[in-house]
Image: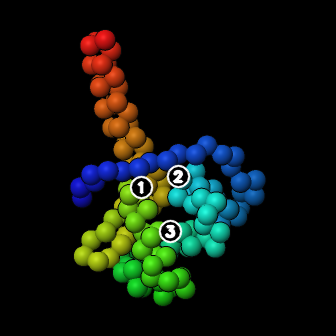
Amino acid sequence: MIIHHQKITIIRQRRPVKKEDINLKLQWLGQSLGLFGQRDKDKSCYRIFVLLLKNSKNNKALTSDQIASKTNLSRGTVVHHLNRLIKSGIVVHNKNKYILRVSSLESLVEEIKKDMDRTLADLKQVARKIDMQL
């Protein structure tokens, strides 16, 4: 998998109070990763994310038509959200099918952490060179 540009957004926010509510936890996790914003009023991106998560556990990729059918969303809406999830590095597109990058949320967080660490290391190296040139 080659990722040319990846946008990682981390939003620090308070954890949900109801610890047993899995939907609140999933929404908090997705919002913390910048996946679900204020504009996602019908929770379409959230629904796509949950569907991909469930299917990724079985290593099952889905087409955009399958996702649209299972979430009762238009294909255009699905493709819009899939493109955002691909840009974030969370979803992989291969042979007209989509799947989460990894099969568990814990692994996903670890992969995002590695991506951020690599990006920060690159920034630090360039900053050091710029500091030396000034």
User: Which amino acid does the dot numbered 3 rest on?
Assistant: Phe
Q: Position of residue 92 (x, y in %)?
A: 33, 65
- At 59% across and 55% down in the image, what residue appears? 31
Q: Quadrant of the N terminus?
A: bottom left
Give the labeled residue for mark 2: 33
Give the labeled residue for mark 3: 49
Q: Looking at this view, is 96 or 107 the one in front? A: 96
Q: Which mark is residue 20?
A: none
Q: Are marks 2 and 1 in contact (CB under 8 Å)?
A: yes
Q: Position of residue 54 (x, y in %)?
A: 48, 73
Q: Mark 2: which secondary structure?
A: loop
Q: Mark 1: which secondary structure?
A: loop
Local crowd size for mark 3, using a 10 Å CA cut-off: few (<14), some (14–19), many (≥20): many
- At 61% across and 70% down in the image, what residue appears? 43
Q: In the visual, does 24 lie left or right of 51?
A: right
Q: Quadrant of the C terminus?
A: top left
Quadrant of the image occupied by residue 11: top right
